[in-house]
Structures are given as C-alpha cells and as structure tokens.
Image (cartoon, rainbow, N blue to C red):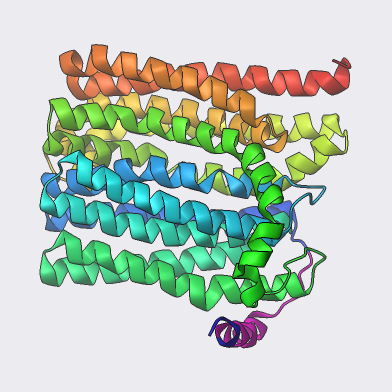
Amino acid sequence: MVIAVAKILRALAYQFAKKSKPLSLRRNFSWTFLSNAVYGICQWGILVAIAKLGTPEMVGRFTLGIAVITPIVLFANLQLRTVQVTDIKQQYDFSDYLILRLISSVLGMLAIIGIIFIGGYKRETSTVILFMGIAKTIESISDVFYGLQQQHERMDKIAQSTIIRNLLSLIIFLFSLYFSQNLIYSTACLIFTAAFTLLSYDIPNTIYLLKNSSNNFVGIHGDLFSTQYLSRKCKVLINLIWVSLPAGLAMVAINLVQNIPRYFIEYYLGERELGIFSGIAYLPLIGYMFIVALGQSALSPLSKYYNSGNIIAFKKLITKLVFLASSLGLIGIIISTSFGKQILTIMYQAEYAQQTSVFNSLMIWGGISYISSFLGYAAGAVRYFRARFISSTVILVLTIIGSLLLIPSYGLQGAAFVLIFNVTIELIITYLIIFHAISKFEYGH
C-alpha cells in the first residue's frame, strides 16, 4: 500500500516540476510576504467570522483552543525546521527530520488528548481543542517538508502551499459556520484542508526536489518505516533530538509568554473578556505578515553568512531588518493612537471599541516584538539554541509573576503591561546573545 501511494505521489510531483535553482532573497521575501498576507487575512477572517456570526464566548473558546494546543504542538515540533534550514553541513538527512517529526507529532497528539481529559473543559470546548489539535498536527508534518524547501531557498513552494491551505480553510469555515452556527463543525473543516494540502501538494513537491538534490531520502518505500531502518537510525535520531530539544523548549517558552496572560484572563475574567482581548491582540500580529516573511527568507542567508565568517554581511542584514521592524512598529502605534476606536468598531463590534487603551498598549507590544523577532531569527541562524532556551525560561517565570500581580487587579490593561515588559526583556537578552556570537569572530573569544 505504501509503495502504491508513493508511486501516485511521484506522478503528481511531475505536475509541479520546475528547476530547483534557489530564488533570490527578494523573490523569496515576495512569495513569503504574499503567503503570510493571505495567512494573516484568513486567520483574521476566521476570527471576525466567529465574532460577527457568533458570540464573544465563541471567540474565547476558539482562541482558548489555540492557546492550549500551541505550546504542545510547538514542543512536539522541536523547532526542527530552524535546525533543518541552518544545517548547512547537512549532518542529517531529510528522512531523519521526517521520522522524528512523525514520532513527535503522535506523542504531541496524545498529550493534547491528555490535557483535554484533565482540563475539565466544557464538552464543546474540549471538542474544539481536539479538532484544532488534529489540524495543527497535520500542519506540523507539512512543516518538515517546508524545511527542505526553505533549505534550498525555494520559499515559493512553501508560499503556494500556505495560500492553498488557508484560502480553503477560510472558505469552508465560513460556509460551515454560516449554515450550521456550530463551531465544532467549522473547526472540523480545518482538518480536511490541512490533510488535503499535505497529500496533494507538499509531498509531491518534496519528492521532486529530493530527486534533484544531494539530500539523501533513502527512498519513500516501506523501508522508510521498517523496524530495521528505525533501529539503524536510532542513534542519529537521538543526536538530532539532543540538538533540537533546546530550540523546541525555547519556542514553547516564548509561546507560553504570549499565552499565559490569556490563561489568567480566562480564569479570572471569563471567556467573554478573553475573546475581546484576543480579538484586539490579533491586530498587532498583522504586522507579523511582514516580519515572518522577511525573517524566514533571511534565515538561510544569515546562517550562510555566519558559517562562512562573513560577519560584515551578517551584521548589515540584521541592521536592515531591525530598521524595517522599528519603522513598522512606529507606524502601527501612530495608527492605533489616532484611529483606534474606529478600527475596533469596524473590525469587530462596539464593545471591543471600549478598550482603546488596551489596543494602544498592545500596539506598543507589537512594535517591540517585531524587533525582537528579527533578532530571534538571527539567534536561530547562529544556532544558539540553548542560550535561547535559558533566556526564554527566565522570561516565562517573569510572565507568570506579572500575570498573577497585574491581571486580577488591572484586567486586560494589566495583561497588556505584562506583554510589554516581557518582550522588552526578551529584546535585550536576544541582543546580548547575538553580540556574543559576533564577538567570537571579531574578538576571537
């Protein structure tokens, strides 16, 4: 059966056959920005659809689902894509990344099911969390295929896959929610779109790329999943886990820093207030369409500059990224302070517009986050994964303390203050990490 499916996928791959020559940074950025724009619009569209067609409680239920599953999925991912892209010396084969991702995804899904059982959530909330977990797990399998494409600087293939999946998700989600008025049915549609994109596009594209590259895939036959093969690769997989585990833990900590205030809001203030906060907090994330697009496109060049010792080019690219992030953040703050109430009223409903001060604070958080994110990509490019994990753990502890102190007393504004303080600390620490990495070349220590 596996061999038969593999033959079908190989045949499909030739429909997408193009030269595997790397694209320029500008073209990779253009494709990634387009895909992130579509992704951001579609994710925001889903949130707006729930707000318009449903209730703040439904928004809170949906965003709570995201907050619950995201740390687990991120940990299961082990930041393999960053490790894969920055593996300039090709210490590991694509099959190593794929097998580890499949194993970790299964374990991650079991963890999500366990959280649902012990979490004491309502039945509808539990079902939404389960379906979202399945959809994100399938997406995480696509992510390891994206890693190979990104390593070869073919962000166009990743962008096309992302666009297909998110447009389908938005369209099907809207139709389902409009006709059923049921969040469970609509969330189930996300599973279909994730699986469809993986099988019909990601796998065929990757097979073609592997056939035209030096990366050893070992074939896509039953041998890939055999006991003998897994036994032979056991030592390699353990080494890969050791390399990627700090990066995965760091990403989980970073995500928890953003989501822990949401947990406290849901506990102290309820799902309605969580829905309002999540809706407002999504607007600063629109800027991440630009940040992630440029950051992902720059990750491979940054890694190559650093590993080749071209520190001048490395610093020059980081400086450009930080300048762009600062400019984007400043524009966002100006817009929110000038038109915040109108924006919230148009985007959502009148009750959201009562939180303009929270909106302004979150835009400040977003502006600082843009700069910190670019520095985070640079830290990933130099593979300082353990240092990132330690710093993220410190920030996580500060987030818990800040949430305990501020959210019960100051509500949503307190949650915004917690985010601003912690992202500022993160920015400073990440800068010090990069400074240390550069000093190894410039000062020889």
**Residue 352 included in the magenta stretch of the image:** no
Left or right: residue 248 versus residue 304 is left
Q: Is residue 110 above or below residue 264?
A: below
Q: Which residues are magenta?
A: 5-21
Point 16% across, 29% down: residue:
267
Which quadrant of the rendered structure holds the C terminus?
top right
Looking at the rendering, which quadrant does residue 23 occupy?
Answer: bottom right
Asked whether residue 324 is in view, the answer is: no
Left or right: residue 88 versus residue 109 is right
Residues 380 and 26: in front is: 380
Left or right: residue 293 versus residue 165 is right
Q: How many marks?
A: 0
Left or right: residue 296 versus residue 197 is right
Residue 404 position, x and y percent, is 25, 15
Looking at the rendering, which quadrant does residue 315 occupy?
Answer: top right
Q: Is residue 426 above or below residue 85?
A: above
Asked whether residue 438 is in view, the answer is: yes
Looking at the rendering, which quadrant does residue 167 occupy?
Answer: bottom left
Point 26% across, 39% down: residue:
278
Residue 202 position, x and y percent, is 56, 70
Residue 159 position, x and y percent, is 56, 62
Residue 117 position, x and y percent, is 21, 46
**Residue 15 included in the magenta stretch of the image:** yes
Point 45% across, 19% down: residue:
395
Point 35% across, 46% down: residue:
111
Q: Is residue 349 above or below residue 52?
A: above
Magenta region's main secondary structure? helix
Residues 108 and 416: in front is: 108
Residues 345 and 30: in front is: 30
